[in-house]
Amino acid sequence: MAVGHAGGLGPDEVERSFCWSPQGKPSSCDCSAGRTRALCYLTLKQYKEAVQDCTEALRLDPKNVKALYRRAQALKELKDYKSSIADIKSLLTTEPKNTAALRLLQELNRA
C-alpha cells in the first residue's frame, strides 16, 4: 500500500476502493472514491488524471463542491484558466462564501 496520500492510500489503492452495484454500475460511494483519488493525483502533480476523476464524479453529482474545486485546481495547473474559473463560479453558486474557492478565483483572475 502506498503511503502519504489521502489517508495513506495512493491512487491505485483508492481506485480499487470504488464500489459497484450488482448490475456493474457505479454506486454512490464511487463519487467519493473518485474525489479522493483526484486528491492523490493533485498531490502527485498528475493533473490530467485528476481532471478525469473529477469529471466522472461530477457526472454522478454535478454540484459536488469538492470535485468542482479539485478539478479547478488541476485545470489551473494545466493553464486552462477559463475552464478553472467556470468550475469555481459553479461551485460558488452552491457555496458563495467558500473561502478556498474565493481565494482560488482571485489567483485565477491574476493569472
Image: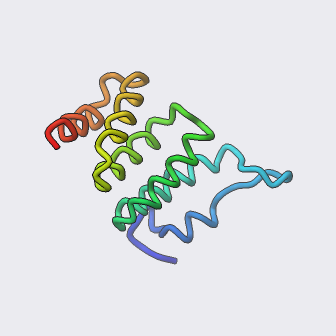
Left/right placement of residue 30 relative to residue 67 reads right
At x 32%, y 48%, the residue is 80
Question: In the displayed structure, would residue 104 be above or below residue 18?
Answer: above
Q: Is residue 77 left or right of residue 31?
A: left
| Image position of 39 with respect to 1: above or below | above
Asked if 99 appears above or below 16 in the picture, the reply is above
Give the position of the C terminus as an image quadrant.
top left
- Check the image and tell me how it is coloured: rainbow
* Quarter of the view holding residue 66: top left
The residue furthest bottom is: 1
Residue in view at x 36 percent, y 26 percent: 92
Residue at 25 percent of width and 31 percent of height: 102
Residue 55: % across, % down: 52, 46
* Residue located at (45% from left, 53% from top): 51
Of the pair 40 and 4, the residue shown nearer to us: 40
Residue found at the far right of this picture: 23
Residue 90 image position (x, y, % from top left): 41, 28
**Left or right: 29, with 84 as reference point:** right
Q: Is residue 81 left or right of residue 28?
A: left
Q: Position of residue 32 (x, y in %)?
A: 56, 48
